[in-house]
Amino acid sequence: MSNEPGPPPPAQETPASPAVPPKRRSRLRQGLTVFAGIVVVYLVMAYVVMPSLWKRYERRHPSFEDVPRVTHTASGIPGDPLNVALIGTEEDLKRIMKAAKWYAADPLNIRDDLKIAAAAVLKHPYDDAPVSNLFLFGRKEDLAFEQPVGNDPRKRHHVRFWKTQLVDAADRPVWVGSAIFDDRVGISRKTGQITHHTAADIDTERDYLFTDLKRTGELAEFFIVEDFHKVREGRNGGGDPWHTDGNLYAGVIGPADQAGGKRP
């Protein structure tokens, strides 16, 4: 028997990769092109366009991030939550509220407190009845307005405003406020004082106020600060419950020389 190695086995041929059909290659190139285009558009929007838009928005609309969310009574008890804001001078604010047929509230004193009680019992109207003091930034409201409901003094629309340190691009101050509906007169559950009890749905009063403001034609711009409230329910200083969708409505008052004109 021979020990010589036999001839090597024939090399196995590697099967050739199947050729990609031209149509499939074309679709693949198109898909890659579309994907690359989407990535480019995303990068431009996320890192160029949106930051630019936000900078323009913040120049026009001051940030409300550092504004307190809830007022307090003189005793430090949580009061009514904020739900509105207006941008303009004090004269602008007084002018648009007057045009909206909201009356400046009388100062609060014992005589007017008794007058409220008498008006409620006798069902006499009291268009400019005082509102109780609430505190924000360490001081009571700067301005307060109300609107009666028929001849029933137990029910009324009212709003308190506080001037903030914020200003807009035109250096006009920002006012934050609490618009609340009083639905009856009674005794405070927390203090025992004569007071108006308030409706729980503060969004309805917020919407009502801005409907009146828009009708004046003096509101130059309207915008919504979404999720202003993270805590969306609670109780005020009188023990009345409140709830909200969390949004704060804000408006820019038009200049006095354009008052009464049509707004966008």
Image: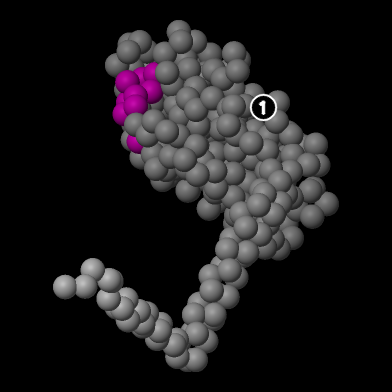
Task: Name the residue located 44 percent from the left edge and 21 percent from the top edge.
Answer: 79
Q: Position of residue 67 (x, y in %)?
A: 58, 27
Place residue 136 in its image quadrant. top right
Identify whether 158 is placed above or below 216.
above
**Quadrant position of the C terminus in the picture:** bottom right
Magenta region, residue range: 234-243
Q: Position of residue 186 (x, y in %)?
A: 32, 22
Task: Name the residue located 60 percent from the left edge and 70 percent from the top edge.
Answer: 37
Identify whether 246 is placed above or below 231.
below
- Residue closest to the eye, 192 or 123: 192
Identify whether 170 is placed above or below 240.
below
Place residue 106 in its image quadrant. top right
| Dot 1 amino acid type | Thr
Task: Name the residue located 51 percent from the left edge and 19 percent from the top edge.
Answer: 134
Q: In the current view of this chain or complex, which residue is farthest to the top?
A: 75
- Disc 1 target residue: 164
Q: Is residue 197 visible?
A: yes
Q: In the current view of this chain or complex, which residue is farthest to the right?
A: 257
- Specify whether 9 is left or right of 124: left
Task: Name the residue located 47 percent from the left edge and 25 percent from the top edge.
Answer: 70
Q: Position of residue 226 (x, y in %)?
A: 50, 44
**Quadrant position of the N terminus in the picture:** bottom left
Q: Element type at marker 1?
A: strand
Q: In the current view of this chain or complex, which residue is farthest to the front?
A: 1
For disc 1, the neighbor class at 10 Å (few under 14, some 14 to 19, many from 20) is: some
- Residue closest to the eye, 36 or 6: 6
Q: Is residue 154 visible?
A: no
